[in-house]
Amino acid sequence: MTRVIPYRGFEIHVTLTASSDDLYDASFQIIGGSNLGVLGKSGHRIPLRNGPFTERWAFLIAECAGQAAIDVLLGTVNED
């Protein structure tokens, strides 16, 4: 299963791979951005550790991990 999540000018591509009944291993890849191109080691997918996860939990964790990686590169948005 795959899902693409737009975030701050990037796309977080999340992929779930079934590991057993109703449990999935998750990985993500960040693509886009005007100056940064493709992130991650040579643009490869980044697997999530401590799995497998349920479907909803896997998508949530992968999305949060991708957003955190983008926030580290771009900095956080200051809301005064």
Image: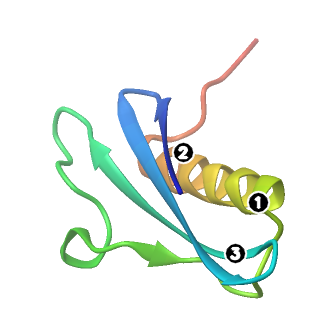
Amino acid carrying mark 3 in the image = Tyr
The residue pinned by badge 3 equals 24
> Horizontal and vertical percent for residue 16?
57, 66
Q: Residues within 10 Å of mark 3 (few under 14, many from 20)?
A: many
Q: Residue at x 72, y 16 (%)?
A: 79
| Element marked by disc 1 | helix
Q: Residue at x 73, y 63 (%)?
A: 58
Amino acid carrying mark 1 in the image = Glu
Q: Is residue 51 left or right of residue 10?
A: right
Disc assigned to residue 41: none
Q: For the residues carrying marks 1 and 2, which lies nearer the camera in this image?
A: 1
The residue pinned by badge 1 equals 55
Residue 32, image quadrant = top left
Q: Is residue 17 left or right of residue 59?
A: left
Q: Is residue 62 left or right of residue 29?
A: right
The residue pinned by badge 2 equals 71
